[in-house]
Image: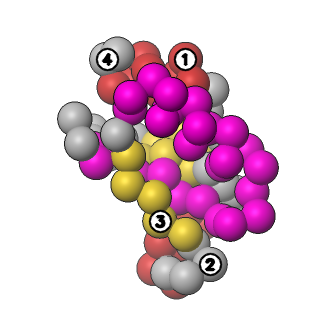
Amino acid sequence: MAGTVTMYSTTWCGYCRRLKSQMDREGIAYTEINIEHDPESATFVEKANGGNQTVPTVLFPDGSTLTNPSLAQVKQKVGV
C-alpha cells in the first residue's frame, strides 16, 4: 500500500497537516506533493477543483480525487 495515495498540499495548509497526521496515525501510506514547488501538480489540482488550487486534494489509485476529505473518506477509498 506504500505510496498508493497522492496528497497534493502546501506548507501553510492546516487541513493538509491534519489529514497527514491522521493518515500517519492510521498507517495509510501516501506520497505528498507540494503544489507551490511543482507547477504541473498545481495545474492538476486546478483541473480537479474547477480552476481552484484547493488542498488537500487526494488522488487515489483508481484515478479519482477527493478535495479536503475526512479520514473516514480516505479509509473507505483505500479499503482500510
For the point 68% across and 66% down, the residue is: 11
Label 1: element kind: helix
Q: CA distance from mark 1 to mark 4?
A: 10 Å
Task: Please tell me the numbered disc located at residue 79.
Answer: 4
Q: Which residues are magenta?
A: 3-28
Q: CA distance from mark 2 to mark 4?
A: 30 Å
Q: Earlier in the sequence, mark 3 or mark 1?
A: 3
Residue 26, image quadrant: top left
Task: Kindly identify which numbered label has been placed on residue 59.
Answer: none
The alpha-carbon separation of the residues under discs 3 and 4 comes to 22 Å
Give the position of the N terminus as an image quadrant. top left
Task: In the rendered view, tell whether residue 23 sits above or below residue 13.
Answer: above
Residue shown at 67%/47% (left/top)? Answer: 17
Q: Nearer the viewer, residue 73 or 64?
A: 73
Crowd around label 1: few <14 · some 14–19 · many ≥20 (10 Å): few
Residue at point 56%, 42% (across, down): 20
Q: Which residue is mark 2?
A: 36
Disc 1 + disc 4, Cβ < 8 Å = no
Tag 3 secondary structure: strand
Alpha carbon of mark 3 to alpha carbon of mark 1: how far?
A: 21 Å
Residue 46 lies in quadrant: bottom right
Query: In the rendered structure, which disc, 1 or 4, sits on the residue that comes first in sequence?
Result: 1
